[in-house]
């Protein structure tokens, strides 16, 4: 077999020139090529175009390269909690192309597979589709997207052999298999480098044909962005007891999550967005069997781990540490969004900044003030048949977030089916309008009317919701 082993990270990046286009694997801080990023910092190469789902955090990962102004352009889906990334984007110091996460994964996969363009429903009706070709297929509109390729792809794997074959651990797989195929030169750093023949061929995630250079990394920090630990039983009981208390001010986030959990049916495959939706998993009724899907490459999310079971290579889409249930599956981000785009997910629960009476949703940026990126939201709302939104009914100023028309940039059109807020449960009816189904304990219909700008439909006596 061809031996592709090199001495280390500095040799691996030695010929990367200024102005190069790089793909860097990772989701948050999970699976990032730490050694290679450190070598790029030492080399001082600049004017880079970096293709990565996000840019790590301010003091780790690609975030360090942003601080040293080595990056000219980012092609990403999510800004996340990286304040420097957001600051440079808003100030115009950094060129940023934000792309729906599933589209990003598929553009990279297409680049490695030699497919110059494809059509996807994600982003139709949003600013992502501006200037792009739109076509109708089977009565649904799709936007044309083009492939992504790179001069160099840099990935990090758990195990690799001297022939360049790679195995990834847990959710650290994410974008790396597609990136390895889409780079003209692919650099792989691995935690464990073994002789060719040492790995089971049936377990290989990335065949060596896609890898030109491989080295064993060292001193991995493997930082965890959201270290989330399971609650002791006493705290769980206290939380459960607390959500029974009626404050008269509407529901808190746990109560919203508990009410939404009643919408989950036995046998559902469910995708939970970040924020309040992640709490829904805590309140799935007994006797209901559901499988939770996470767009970073996990089917069968288990509870948060105990401290001794925390694994930095096992996170959900919110970057929280999780465990695996029996029967779970791990896969790449491209595979994950194939499940979503292909209509295999039964229910999607996500947050929102605004929802219109036609079911439009806005949840990814406030122009000039805040840009977190759309992440996987555009893909989810474009493909899911059943979408429930968990959100606040009003903003901090007391203004309605259930509107006649969204004022913020759209994430998806006519997609929301049901909404649960601190005040009410509402259904978006096909002809337009919010049909009031239930009111929160202690909340009157009059309070809901006053808090809703969009068309509110009230039929008969409105029951108080059960928690």
Image (cartoon, rainbow, N blue to C red):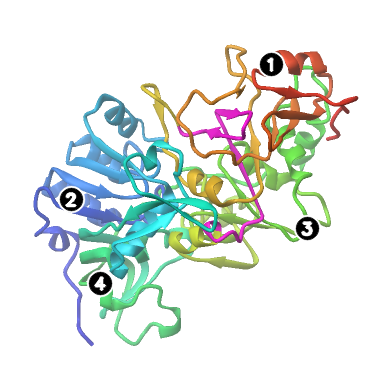
Question: Residue 27: horizontal and vertical position, in percent?
Answer: 41, 51
Residue mark closest to the camera, 3 vs 2:
3
Which residue is painted at 33% across and 74% down in the image?
Answer: 160
Q: Earlier in the sequence, mark 2 or mark 1?
A: 2
Residue 338 locus on image (x, y percent): 50, 62
Q: Is residue 355 visible?
A: yes
Return the residue at label 4: 211
Sort mark 1 into few (<14), some (14-19) or many (20+) by Cα contacts within 10 Å: some
Q: Name the residue at the right extreme.
A: 461
Q: Residue at x 35, y 39 (%)?
A: 130
| C-alpha separation, residue under disc 4 versus residue under disc 1 | 57 Å
Q: As drawn, is 353 to the left or to the right of 114?
A: right
Residue in the foreground of this view, choosing between 109 and 1:
109
- The residue under label 1 is 451
Real-space Cα separation, disc 3 to disc 1, in angstroms: 34 Å
Q: Position of residue 173 (x, y in %)?
A: 42, 62
Say if mark 3 contacts mark 2, CB within 8 Å. no
Q: Vertical placement of 37 versus 168: above or below?
A: above
Q: Could you say which is closer to the camera, residue 131 or residue 280?
A: 131
Which range of residues does the magenta coloring cover? 340-364
Upstream in sequence: badge 4 or badge 1: 4
Say whether residue 345 is magenta: yes
Q: Nearer the viewer, mark 3 or mark 1?
A: 1
Of helix, strand and loop, which one carries label 3?
loop
Q: Secondary structure at mark 4?
A: loop
Residue that badge 3 annotates: 266
The residue wearing badge 2 is 40
Indicate the quadrant containing the C terminus: top left, top right, bottom left or bottom right.
top right
Q: Which element is circle 2 on? A: helix
* Dot 3 or dot 1, earlier in sequence: 3
Q: Earlier in the sequence, mark 4 or mark 2?
A: 2
User: Considering the image in quadrants, where does the N terminus appear?
Assistant: bottom left
């Amino acid at each position: 077999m061809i031996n592709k082993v090199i001495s280390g990270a500095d040799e691996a990046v030695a010929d990367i020139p200024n102005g190069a286009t790089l793909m860097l694997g990772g989701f948050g801080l999970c699976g990032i090529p730490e050694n290679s990023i450190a070598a790029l910092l030492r080399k001082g190469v600049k004017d880079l175009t970096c293709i990565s789902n996000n840019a790590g955090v301010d003091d780790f990962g690609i975030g360090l390269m942003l601080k040293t102004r080595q990056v000219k352009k980012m092609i990403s889906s999510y800004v996340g909690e990286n304040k420097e990334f957001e600051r440079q984007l808003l100030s115009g110091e950094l060129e940023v192309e934000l792309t729906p996460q599933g589209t990003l994964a598929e553009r990279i996969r297409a680049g490695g597979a030699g497919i110059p363009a494809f059509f996807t429903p994600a982003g139709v009706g949003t600013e992502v589709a501006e200037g792009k070709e739109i076509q109708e297929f089977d009565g649904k509109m799709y936007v044309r997207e083009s492939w992504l390729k790179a001069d160099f792809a840099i990935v990090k794997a758990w195990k690799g052999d001297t022939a360049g074959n790679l195995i990834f651990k847990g959710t650290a797989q994410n974008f790396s298999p597609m990136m390895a195929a889409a780079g003209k030169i692919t650099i792989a750093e691995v935690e464990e480098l073994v002789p060719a023949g040492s790995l089971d061929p049936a377990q290989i995630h990335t065949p060596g044909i896609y890898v030109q250079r491989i080295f064993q990394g060292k001193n991995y920090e493997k930082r965890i962005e959201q270290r989330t630990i399971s609650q002791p039983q006493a705290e769980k009981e206290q939380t459960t007891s607390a959500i029974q208390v009626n404050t008269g001010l509407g529901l808190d986030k746990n109560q919203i999550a508990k009410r939404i959990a009643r919408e989950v049916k036995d046998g559902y495959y469910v995708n939970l967005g970040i924020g309040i939706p992640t709490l829904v998993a805590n309140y799935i009724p007994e006797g209901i069997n559901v499988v939770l899907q996470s767009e970073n490459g996990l089917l069968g999310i288990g509870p948060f781990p105990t401290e001794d079971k925390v694994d930095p290579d096992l996170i959900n889409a919110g970057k929280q540490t999780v465990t695996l249930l029996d029967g779970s599956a791990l896969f790449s981000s491209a595979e994950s969004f194939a499940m979503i785009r292909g209509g295999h997910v039964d229910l999607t629960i996500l947050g929102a900044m605004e929802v219109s009476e036609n079911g439009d949703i806005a949840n990814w940026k406030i122009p000039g003030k805040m840009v977190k990126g759309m992440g996987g939201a555009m893909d989810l709302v474009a493909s899911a048949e059943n979408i429930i939104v968990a959100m606040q009914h009003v903003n901090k100023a007391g203004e309605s977030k259930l509107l006649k028309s969204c004022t913020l940039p759209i994430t998806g059109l006519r997609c929301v089916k049901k909404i649960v807020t601190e005040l009410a449960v509402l259904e978006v009816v096909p002809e337009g309008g919010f049909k009031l189904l239930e009111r929160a304990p202690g909340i009157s219909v009059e309070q809901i009317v006053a808090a809703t700008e969009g068309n509110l439909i009230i039929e008969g006596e409105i029951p108080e919701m059960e928690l």
